[in-house]
Amino acid sequence: MKLSLYQRLSLSLLSVFVAILIVFFYWANSLEKQARYEAQQGLHLSLAENLVNDNPILKQGVYDYEALKNLFHTLMVLGPAFEFYLLDPTGKILTHSIDKHLIKRKQVSLAPLLNLIENNAALPIYGDDPKNELRQKVFSVAPVYNGESLQGYLYVIVAGEQYESAFATPQLNQQAKLSLMAFVGAILFLFIVMLGLFRYFTKPLRQLNSDIHALKAAGFAQDKVALAPWKRNTSNEVHQLGIVFEEMAKQISEQLNQLKLADVQRRELLADISHDLRTPLASLQGYVETVALGLDSLSPEQKDKYLQTALKNAKDLKSLIDQIFELAHLEGGQVSIQLESFNITELLYDVLAKFSLKCQAKGIEMSIVPSHSETLILGDIAKLERVLTNLIENAIRHTPAQGHIYLQVDEIKGNQCQVTVKDTGTGIKKEELSYIFDTRYRASNAVNAGEKHAGLGLAITKKLLELMHSEIAVSSDIGQGAAFSFALKKVSVN
């Protein structure tokens, strides 16, 4: 049978309480017994001395053992709680007041007797019981002299067996009843208090356990479960644990939603990519098959046209596959950043030179504003060059002949500068601006553009800038061109 925390705590405390009660009972009984013996011995401390002084037989030092036995018997009748023994100077028993068959010792130790006579120890002092080889009892003792000669000792057990029997039976019965009543009352009181306290202290744990099971049953969807409110800014560890659990449940729920959304996006991406891959692949296969089947019937001009078309489709296919791998590499968190300081204007001139021929062929002018700057920024040169390349390719693709592309660097507040790639092209509809950085989203200007492209460039650009702790912004309108801008950390020159 499995026990709850509440039940285990209750049983543990009950066990401890019972153990303490037993120890207390024996300790109290021992103290009571010691106090009783101390009083009994103190009360009869001079009993033996008075008997020696008042009894003529003992005072004469001539011992008629039969007469002494009769005297001891008479004294026992008057005081049944006492047992009388006459000892020689070595502690050997000479005569006594009880039945000889009850005697188990021939001799008693003199050390406790001398301690009592000389008052060398605190009461109670225990001496050997002649009726039991292991037991000791309180006593009264007095030396017996004949003149100056020590004849022995009068040894009196002041709490004999009759006294013990007469005292113990009613005492034990009454004590047992009182102890039993106290025990039962204490147990009932303990259970009432304990159940209340444990119920109070374990209530948050039970609530937390209930929340955990409810969250599990709901598939870890936090919005489907009403979690218990927990006190914040408290030193109660259970409430602190509840707050952490609540935050953990919220994070798990958000991650599950993100995974579901990512799964949907992955399926859509695979569907779009499959379509984009199928188109150039089918075209490539068609033209290669045409050349292969009509190798003898096609003219050299036709063969060259078909092969150039197949080559273009192969390049488009390779470009799309490269972008897919690049995006997967970025989203997998496997890209590291190598930060260094460099002149941003010099990098813009390097990128501009790479596109100068393409711009000339299309009749587009490209310029850097300002034409000269000493602005140093902190970033990854290779990845920033990739960002600028994607943005400039996008600008060239959507800018008609006689258009203009500006690469602009502006100082902004703080220790940052802003880089902007602006064109005078077809522009983007305002309602589409919030979607153009999504993977595989293609704006209407891209759909209507005569030049085909993979459509992953802006998504890759955004991921690269996020790695450099920067965000990209866009402003545009149809027919007014588009401006993409992002901020970079500036390096101060002392």
Image (cartoon, rainbow, N blue to C red):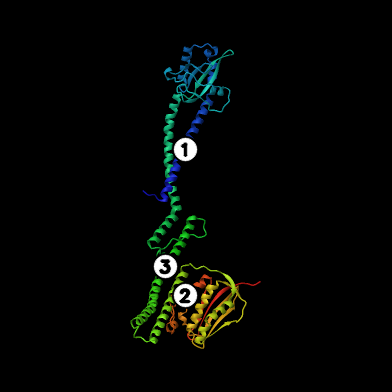
Query: Badge 1, how many Cα within 10 Å: few under 14, some, many 20+?
Result: few
Report the residue at 43% width, 47% height from top: 10
| Disc marking residue 23 | 1
How far apart in space, not on screen, are marks 2 and 1 (Cα)? Answer: 77 Å
Q: In the picture shown, does residue 91 fall above or below 402?
A: above
Mark 2 is on which residue type? Ala
| Quarter of the figure with residue 80 | top left
Q: In the picture shown, does residue 158 fall above or below 306?
A: above
Residue 344 x/y as whole percent = 58, 76
Label 2 near label 3: C-beta < 8 Å?
A: no
What residue would you read off at disc 2? 459
Residue positioned most to the right: 494
Residue 129 x/y as whole percent = 47, 23
| Disc marking residue 419 | none
Quadrant holding the C terminus: bottom right
Report the residue at 44% width, 31% height from top: 171
Residue 352 x/y as whole percent = 55, 80
Sequence-first tag of 2 and 1:
1
Mark 1 is on which residue type? Val
Q: Nearer the viewer, residue 434 or 129?
A: 434
Q: Nearer the viewer, residue 395 or 134?
A: 395
Mark 3 is on which residue type? Leu
Q: In the picture shown, does residue 233 fall above or below 109?
A: below
For numbered disc 1, what is the local secondary structure? helix
For numbered disc 3, what is the local secondary structure? helix
- Comparing labels 3 and 1, the label whose residue is closer to the camera: 3
For numbered disc 2, what is the local secondary structure? helix
Query: Badge 3, how many Cα within 10 Å: few under 14, some, many 20+?
Result: few
What residue would you read off at disc 3? 259
How far apart in space, not on screen, are marks 3 and 2 (Cα)? Answer: 19 Å
